[in-house]
Image: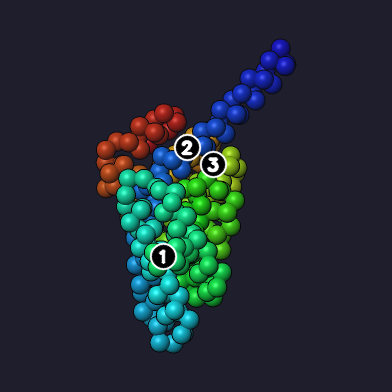
Amino acid sequence: MADKQVITEQTQANDIVEKAKGFWAKYSKKIVIAGSVIIVLLGGFIGYKYLVTIPNEKKANDLIFPAEKLFVTMANGSSYNKDTVNMILNGDKAAGVTGLLKIAGSYGGTKSGNRAHYIIGACYLNLKQYDKAIEHLKDFNANGASQVQSKAYILLGHAYAEQKKTDDASSYYKKAANVSGLDESMATEAIYMAARYAEAMGKTSDAVEFFKKLKDDYPASARVSSGEVDKYLGSLGSVK
């Protein structure tokens, strides 16, 4: 009887961990599209700011543009193309594209080099090379840009989720939801992501906390006004 209980508990634990997989596949396109737009806008501002004062910034900014443009075009498409991802990462001399790995390595002290780490991380995530994705996303510094920081945390959450490292994944989803200064759209998506992952992992109290935060702080959001949040709260045994 004891052996049967152990097997049942192990099966349930495995089922919960398996739910971590697929989180990236379900949410990747929306996240990367929004993240790419934010990161490029941020890059334009930073590039302009430092063009004169730091010579390397201009060179790095010029070099990153073709690969960054490819990334945005790909992110706004229907799917990721491995050949394009490889070009973004490693470059293509004939096409006039400098690989972001080279830019990050040679111009790591520049804002463009820093920005390259974010895009590299997103690309490796799509290639399912999660360790590399984590490495580069952790090297990225949003420098106080809250929207971008939240996106980076979400991507890190996905990478850990796909590795079945549920505690690390939960930690980064929570960080994404708790970044201060987010606009309403980004805040609601980050909180919702944290809530859904907590629910999938069987962390009921965390899920309820985030769903209630979404309902209390953003009552006009589509997820709340449509009744979706109440549906989840009800399924978790907590109706406010």
Residue 102, percent from left and from top:
53, 67
Along the line of sight, the residue nearer the viewer: 115 or 219: 115
User: Residue visible at 55% across and 73% down?
Assistant: 106
User: Residue visible at 40% across and 47% down?
Assistant: 80
Q: Is residue 127 above or below residue 1?
A: below
The earlier-in-sequence mark between 3 and 1 is 1
Amino acid found under the numbered disc labelled 1: Ala
Along the line of sight, the residue nearer the viewer: 7 or 94: 94
Amino acid found under the numbered disc labelled 2: Gly
Q: Residue furthest bottom?
A: 53
Any mark on residue 94, and which?
Answer: 1
Amino acid found under the numbered disc labelled 3: Glu
The quadrant of the image that shows the C terminus is top left
Find disc 2 in the rendering and name its residue.
22
The earlier-in-sequence mark between 1 and 2 is 2
Residue 109, percent from left and from top:
54, 75
